[in-house]
Image (spheres, rainbow, N blue to C red):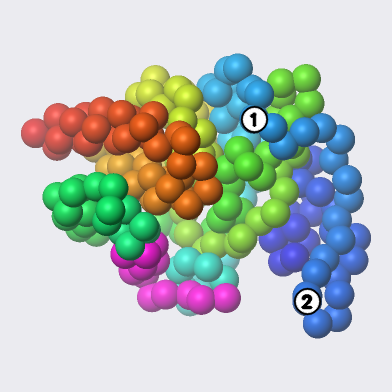
Amino acid sequence: MYFLDFYKKLNLLPNLLFVEKSYNYIVYSFISGTTNFTVKNKQEMLKTLVDEVINNYKTVPKDIGFGYTDELTDSWESFLLNEIIEINKLLKPHLAGDEYNFVLNVLENLKNQDTEREKYLLHGDCGVHNFIYNDGELRGVIDPTPVIGYPLYDLIYAFCSSPNDLTKETIDSAVSHLVIKGKKNTSTLYDEVIIGLYLRLGACIKHHPYDFEKYLNAWYFWKKLSKTVQL
């Protein structure tokens, strides 16, 4: 509710029409199209998402914590760590423990980046399952689960939310359109992709296990790439 009200001027978001007084449900405007992911050009879809939504995100006060707005933590790394720990419970039967340790080391590396970045109100569940398409183009973004954090999180979430085109070229193209970049280099960008992809591996097991093999191939590609750029 708060997210839709906060960003009520963004064309890709539905209009908030009604909020039940106990917050059990909300009603928002209908967006014509389908939620079936049929986009052939992922780079163009991500560019639209960046231009129309993510580049318009607004900052929040510095004294607010990080993570889900109803369960804030004291740091961005703490939020990501909690997510990784939960996902590891799903992945234990499917991945060796070395993969878990690897992603924990990647998260540790991210702690050294600029801690003075401004924080923003994010969609938080910014994946293809919450996108509306019409004629193969992105026409709407629905069902937010608001998160306080950094805009790149929503972009990587969207990038990882489908198993097609999980390539360096696709994410590099999307990030090139991001206005709110922060002080980042290639190494930290790819580290954040590694974390996003690990979280998606767990979501895949839970919601669409038939895609797991494709995600696993992408995981090993990005793991190798991450090690390469850290040399």
Quadrant housing residue 24: bottom right
Coordinates of residue 163 in the picture (x, y in percent): 46, 30
Callout 2 crowding tier (Cα within 10 Å): few <14, some 14–19, many ≥20 = few
User: Which callout, 2 or 1, points to the residue nearer the camera?
Assistant: 1
Q: Secondary structure at mark 2?
A: loop
Identify the main secondary structure in magenta.
Answer: helix
- Asked whether, in this view, residue 36 is left or right of residue 118, the answer is right
Magenta residues, start to end: 70-86
Looking at the image, tell me whether mark 2 or mark 1 is earlier in sequence order.
2
> Residue 205 colored magenta?
no
Mark 1 and mark 2 in contact (Cβ < 8 Å)? no
In the picture shown, does residue 46 fall above or below 158?
Answer: above
Report x, y in % for residue 125: 58, 52
From the image, tell me which residue sits under label 1: 37
- Distance from label 2 to label 1 (Cα)? 30 Å
Which of the labelled discs sits on residue 23, or is there none?
Answer: 2
| Secondary element at tag 1 | loop
Residue 53, percent across and down? 65, 42
Task: Please state, as top left, top right, bottom left or bottom right, where the C terminus lies in the image.
Answer: top left
| Any part of residue 107 in sight | no
Residue in the picture at 58% in, 47% down:
126
Name of the residue lying farthest toward the top = 40
Three-letter code for the amino acid on which mark 2 is drawn: Tyr
- The x, y position of residue 174, in whole percent, is 49, 28
